[in-house]
Image (cartoon, helix red, strand yellow):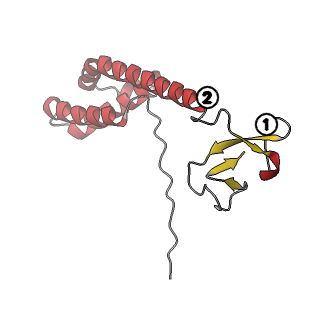
Amino acid sequence: MKTAKLHVRKKVYTLPVSRKFYQDLMARLEDIIRAVCPVTYDECLRAARRMVDYYLNDNLDALPKSAIIPEVNIIFLTLKAEIDSARLRSERARQAALSRRGVRAAVPAPGLEDAVVPAGECSRGSAGEGEVEVEAEGGVGGGVGAGGDYGGVDGWSCR
């Protein structure tokens, strides 16, 4: 008897810095607070994490003034420049990734510029009359006889 696979949806990461930086920052906060606030460690750590999270979500002004502990505020201010540079670095990386994706989508695959199949061999097409554009199969379930919407021709599929 086969068991069904459960697909668990991953939580979307929305912070403006990398996960690694955020994890390293939280580890550093723990070490610093352990040295600065040994008596009220748990309270200070919660306040510091809360302050960083509010700041990363551009919502620091919404943090209640009663939640700000002076020692934690000093620690936060010393780390703020590092957080800002990580935020800028992540923004640049995201922009570069977006531009790379855009370039990849606009560049045709090698050899496809002149690839034309007679319209009778394909069920759909967006090329001119009597011609159908084709693209290389490259994904799950593609290829000849894969059972998709389009008939395959020598490893190519009409679109």
Instruction: Name the residue that disc number 2 marks.
Output: 106
Towards the viewer: 106 or 69: 106
Identify the residue at image location x=25%, y=18%: 78
Residue 58 seen by the camera:
no
- Image vertical order of residue 79 relative to residue 124, above or below: above
- In this picture, residue 142 sits left or right of residue 2: right
Query: Type of residue at label 2?
Result: Ala
Instruction: Name the residue that disc number 1 marks.
Output: 127
Whole-percent x, y for residue 142 in the image: 61, 55
Q: CA distance from mark 2 to mark 1?
A: 17 Å
Which quadrant of the rendered structure holds the C terminus?
Answer: top right
Whole-percent x, y for residue 30 in the image: 22, 36
Identify the residue at image location x=36%, y=29%: 52
Judged from the image, the secondary structure of the residue bearing numbered disc 2 is helix
- In this picture, residue 44 sits left or right of residue 132: left
Q: Residue furthest right?
A: 129
Towards the viewer: 15 or 125: 125
